[in-house]
Every structure is written in structure tokens, then in C-alpha cells.
Amino acid sequence: MVTLVQIVFYCLIGGMASLVGAVLIINLKNRAGILSDKLTSFAAGVLITIAVLDLIPEAFSSMTDFKIGSWAVLLGILLVFLMEKSGLWFHHHDGTHGHRPPISGIFWGDALHNFIDGFAIGGAFLLSREAGILTAVAVGLHELPKEMADFMIYLRSGYSNVKTIFLNLASSLVAVVGGVSVYLSRGWITNYEGYLLATTAGMFLFIALADLIPEMHESMEEADRKNKIIWLLVFVAGLSVGIVSSIGLG
């Protein structure tokens, strides 16, 4: 029961990210986009280090077949790639790269995204408390700039602040459903938590390397030298936080 409470609590972090993102956009207005870009760089650094230094070693330490574990990492990479290309997962941080997908697509894409996030957090907690916390931290930091981008798109589409906050919270709370689902399925997931964690690591790596970092490069191309240095320092800060978190909880 303690594990279930932990899963629900940390899955709610996504909901808090929505609220924080909404408050930042409402108060900062025109500067919110710049802040979201910086947070994206920070999240990329955190995702990479947590995936490589903690989740993958933790996953492999709990499995007997390392080759299957490697396939699990690859599965995570391919899973996000296929979901993005099929349109099931609208993964955006900077206004969807110049085009605006349907609002319903954004909502349901984010709901699916958050369900998988919750499933990943739940699976990590079944393996160990430390892995669960690190996964939740990575998800939460990654969710903040994403939810800020969602909020801006909703507002530009004519939605009110209240309705936008409600939609973001509703999709974010689906993470709890994902977390509880994996907990209730623990009977047949037992002995496979490591492979689930390896899949999560693959997903984090794809999101960071194929989505967040290219966005960082795109933003840096239009920035002056001072801002380029700031971007790199923010990215390094994310790497450092991931390293410290991995060492502290590992």
C-alpha cells in the first residue's frame, strides 16, 4: 500500500507542472516562450543523465538477459518515434514547430503521453523507490516546458485561462491512471520491472536526443553569443542535476 501511495503522489507531479507552467505564462506573458525554451534545455540534460547513469544500470542489475534488456531500450526509442510519426503523440515545446495541430489532438495526445509517463513511474517504483523518484523527477522536469507550450497553444486558440488550466490538469492527471494500472498489474509484471525500466530509459533518450536537443539547436541558431552561452550553461546545469540526483539516490 505504501508503494501505491508513492506512485499516486509522484504521478501528481505532472499536475503540479501544469499549474506551475500556467502561473508562469500568466505572469510572464511574452517572456514565457523564452523561459520554456530554457527549461527544455535543462530537461534534456536531466533526461539524458538519469536515463544513462541511473535507469539503465538499475534495469540491467535486475535482469538476467542483458540482450533482451538492450532490446527493451531500443523498444522505448522506437515506441516514441512511432507514436510521434503516427500522430498519436503530439510532442511539442515551442509552439509545434510552426503549425497548429487540432486542440482535440493536443489534449488526447497529451493524455496518452501522461498515461505512459504514469505507467513508467509506477513500473520504476515496483523495482525500487530510488528508481521511482528519479523517473518522476525526470518526468516532472520534462512536463513543465511541455505544459507551458500546451498552455500557450490553448490561449492562442481562444481558450480562457480557467478552461486552459482545466484541460491541462485533466490530461496531466491521466498519469495517475497509468501509475495505478501498473500497480494493479504487478502480479504478472513481477520479474519484468527491469525491462519496463529499460524501455522507459529508451523513451527518455529519444525525447532528449531527437526532440529536445534539436529544439535547443534551432533556438541557439537565432540567438546572439551571450544567449548561446546561457543555453549551454542551462543544458550543463541539467546534466549536473541529473548526475547529482543519480549519485544521491543511487
Image (spheres, grey):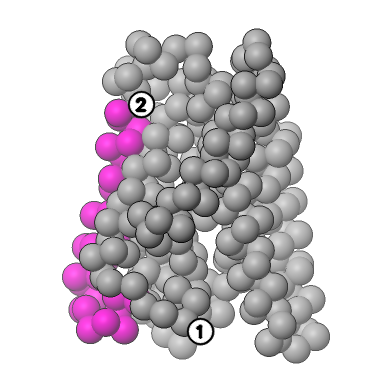
Q: Position of residue 214 (x, y in %)?
A: 65, 67
- Give residue 147's position: percent from left, percent from top: 40, 64
Q: Does the magenta segment cover residue 230?
A: no
Residue linked to disc 2: 182
Q: Dividing the image into 4 quarters, which one contains the C terminus?
A: top right
Which residue occupies 55% across, 36% down? 75
Q: Is residue 139 left or right of residue 15?
A: right
Identified by mark 2, the residue type is Val
- Which residues fall within the magenta stretch? 153-181
On screen, residue 233 above or below 50? below
Most prominent secondary structure in the magenta stretch?
Answer: helix
Q: Quadrant of residue 182?
A: top left
Gap in angstroms between the C-alphas marked 2 and 1: 39 Å
Label 1, residues with CA under 10 Å away: few <14, some 14-19, many ≥20: few
| Label 1 secondary element | helix
- The residue that label 1 is drawn on is 31
Q: Say if 144 sits above or below 58 in the image.
A: below
In the shown orientation, is residue 172 left or right of residue 224? left
Rendered residue at 66%/56% (across/down): 209
Camera sees residue 208: yes
Residue 2 visible here: no
Residue at image position (46%, 21%) is 126
